[in-house]
Image (spheres, rainbow, N blue to C red):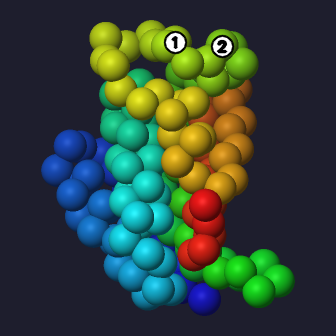
Amino acid sequence: MSKDTMQIVREQDVVPFRNRVREFSTKIGMSLVNQTKLITAASELVRNMLKYAGGGKVLLEIISKNTQTGVRLTFTDEGPGIADVQQAMRDGFSTGKSLGLGLPGTKRLVNEFDIKSIVGEGTTVTIIHWKNGR
């Protein structure tokens, strides 16, 4: 299975990252609709990482479970962390001045979503979109 890690430290890193996500999803034959959902979710998360944590890294993986194949993206930063993850997962909640998708919108775009955050240490968000997901 394919695996890659990308450092995201500035805005210029976003386009090559999106292209890499597209490559991974194309490799497994993901439909254009599902590719778009995954890339949209990934873009939101990578921009959050830049905005709130000054960057971080993303592990891109092609994974298999039973008969399914998918793309798993793990975003890791060493930013300030999220004090109240439950609140951050509510629609309309934003600490920034954006009307972005936010974490709840991102979660709706993918099949699996997991967030772990420790104040003062950072945040890890893992998303999975299966080839034949939704």
Nearest the eye: 86 or 82: 86
Q: Are marks 1 and 2 in contact (CB under 8 Å)?
A: yes
Please state, as top left, top right, bottom left or bottom right, where the N terminus lies in the image: bottom right
- Residue 34 pos. (x, y %): 46, 65
Q: Residues within 10 Å of mark 1 (few under 14, many from 20)?
A: few
The residue under label 1 is which amino acid type? Phe
Residue 83 appears in view = no
- Residue 7 pos. (x, y %): 38, 56
Mark 1 residue element:
loop
The residue under label 2 is which amino acid type? Gln
- Residue 30 pos. (x, y %): 47, 78
Please state, as top left, top right, bottom left or bottom right, where the C terminus lies in the image: bottom right
Residue 20 appears in view = yes
**Left or right of 37: which side holds 91?**
right
Mark 1 highlights which residue? 93
Q: Residue at x 35, y 78 (%)?
A: 23
Q: Identify the mark at residue 87; answer none if there is no mark.
A: 2
**Left or right of 104: which side holds 36?**
left
**Left or right of 31: which side holds 74?**
right
As drawn, 86 above or below 123: above
CA–CA distance between discs 1 and 2?
7 Å
Q: Residue at x 56, y 70 (%)?
A: 71
